[in-house]
Amino acid sequence: MKKGKQPKTNAIRLLDKAKIDYKLHEYPWSQNYSDSQTSLEQLDPTRQKLVKTIVTIGDKTGVMVACIPGKSEIDLKALAKVSGNKKIELLHLEDLEKTTGYIRGGCSPIGMKKHFPVYLSKDIQNLDTMIVSAGRRGFQVELAPQDLKELVKAEFVAIEA
C-alpha cells in the first residue's frame, strides 16, 4: 500500500457511507502476537479505549459478536444470558474468515459478511471514543461508541468477567 493511501475495507466503506466521523490509525502488525500487542498499546497505553472483537456461537441464536475493552475478559455465561442462549462457545479460528469475511488480527464488528447480533460491553458506552479493528491487520478505527452501536444495531450489556 502506498504511503498516505487509506485502505478500503468493508468497515471503512460502511463508516464512509454512513457519514460517521472516525480516525484511522495504522500500526505495525506482526505474526508475533506480543509485537502486535505492543504496537496496539501505543495507540492506547491505558487499554481503556482499545476494544477487541470476539465472535461466538450460541446454541439458540448462532453466530454473535461481542466487543469488550482490550484489558478485559469476556463472561460467556453473561453473554448467554443477555442473548437468550443456554450455552455459548468461541467461534473456531479456522471458521473466522468464512463466517465473517475477516481474519484473526483484522476482525471488525463493522462490515461482516452477514449481519450478526452485536453486544457491546457497558464499560464502552461512556467513553468519548473507542478503537476497533478497521477490518485489516495493522489498521484500527477510532469512533464514538454510540456511532458503532447505531451502525451495527448493537446493544450495551454487562458481558465482562
Image: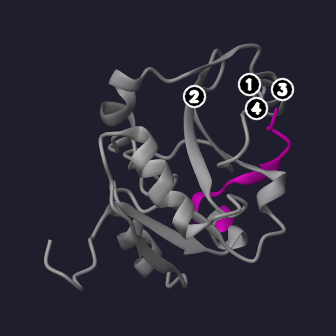
The label nearer to you, 3 versus 1, is 1
The residue sitting at 38% across, 50% down in the picture is: 106
Specify which label sits upstream in the sequence, 3 or 2. 2
Q: Are marks 3 and 4 in contact (CB under 8 Å)?
A: yes
Taking the magenta stretch, the answer to whether it contains residue 159 is yes
Q: Quadrant of the N terminus?
A: bottom left
Residue carrying label 2? 56
Q: For mark 1, what is the residue?
A: 76
Q: Position of residue 154 (x, y in %)?
A: 68, 54
The reply to whether dot 4 and dot 1 touch (C-beta < 8 Å) is no
Secondary structure state at the residue bearing disc 3: helix
Q: Which residue is mark 4?
A: 83
Q: Which sits earlier in the primary sequence, circle 2 or circle 1? A: 2
Question: In 3D space, how far apart are the residues under numbered discs 2 and 4 (Cα atoms)?
Answer: 11 Å
Q: Position of residue 87 (x, y in %)?
A: 71, 13
Q: If you read the primary sequence from the N terminus, does the residue marked by circle 3 or circle 1 appear first?
A: 1
Residue 158, located in which quarter of the rendered image?
top right
Residue 14 visible in the current orientation: yes
Between 102 and 118, the one nearer to me in the picture: 102
Task: Tell me which residue sits at (68%, 58%) in the image.
Answer: 47
Separation of marks 3 and 2 at Cα, in angstroms: 14 Å
> In this figure, which residue is indicated by the disc labeled 3?
81
**Residue bounds of the magenta highlight:** 149-161
Residue 7 x/y as whole percent: 26, 71
Image coordinates of residue 25 in percent, x first then y, are 44, 73
